[in-house]
Amino acid sequence: MFPSDSSETSSDSCTLVISDTSSRPCTPSPISPTKSRRPPVPLRLQSVGIDPSLIVGKVLTRISRSPKHPTLTLDFSDHTTFQILVDGYDPVYRGVPKRLEMDHSLETLMNTPTGQVHVELTIEDCALITLTDKAFEMKQKEERWDQNHTGVALRFKEDRAWHCVWATLAEHDEKLGACIFRSYDDVYLDRLQRSPRKRRSRAPSSPTKGKRGTGVDHLVT
C-alpha cells in the first residue's frame, strides 16, 4: 500500500521514486552566485493549497508541463483545472533553479515535444505524502543531510498504480561541469481559477465615407 497522507517514506524504498535520487545527474541550469547555504527549513506542519481528495473521481483529459516554470497543469472533463506547484516559488525572484520530477512511468508519458499529453484517466485516489531524500552540497568537502519534502501522489483507476510528483533544487558549477548543490522542496495541489471570457466587441466603423471600419476584435481571458 502506498503511503497515505502525512506518512513518511524514503525514496530508496518507494517504488515510485528512482532509488538514491541524490545521485542522479542534475538538469543543466544557469548557475547563480556561489554562497554559503543552510539546509532548507523543515517540512511545514500544514501544507498550502487544496485537499487532494477533491479531485478524486474526476476524469483527467490533459496533462501539461510548463516550459518556463516548475508547474504541472491538470485539465479535467468537467472543465476544471488544477496545478501541482512548488511551495514558495516566485516567478520573478526564482533563486536556486527548481524543477518538478516524477516517477518513471509518468515521466515517460509526459515525454512529448510539446510537454502536453491528452489522456482519459480517472483519479481513483490522490494524497500528499512525505518523502525523505539525501540532499548534498559541495564545499571544501561534500555535505549530505536527510531532507523531508512533500510530494503529490495520484492513482489512476485504469492502471491502479501510484504516480508521484516532487520538486528538486539544483545548482551547477560551469567550470567543474558538475552539480554542486541539490535539495528538495514541497509541492502542493491548487485549483486554477480562470477568468470568465467576455463577449467579443467590435469598435464602430469609421464615419468617413469610402473607408472601412478599423475595429479590432478583443477577447479578454
Image (cartoon, rainbow, N blue to C red):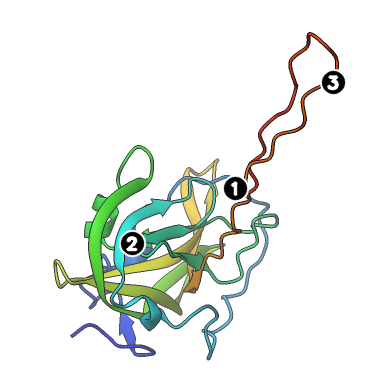
Residues at marks 1 and 2, CA–CA distance in whole angstroms: 40 Å
Check disc 2 and give the amino acid type.
Answer: Ser
Q: Where is residue 184 shown, x and y percent of the image?
A: 47, 69
User: What residue is shown with label 3?
Assistant: 207
Q: Where is residue 39 shown, x and y percent of the image?
A: 57, 75
User: SS at mark 2?
Assistant: loop
Left or right: residue 122 compared with residue 70: left
Residues at marks 2 and 3, CA–CA distance in whole angstroms: 47 Å
User: SS at mark 3?
Assistant: loop
Q: Quadrant of the N terminus?
A: bottom left
Q: Report how many numbered discs are placed on residues in the image.
A: 3
User: What residue is shown with label 2?
Assistant: 77
**Which residue does the image show at 66% across and 33% down from the upper left?**
217
| Of 211 and 116, the residue lying toward us | 211
Badge number at residue 31: 1
Check disc 3 and give the amino acid type.
Answer: Pro
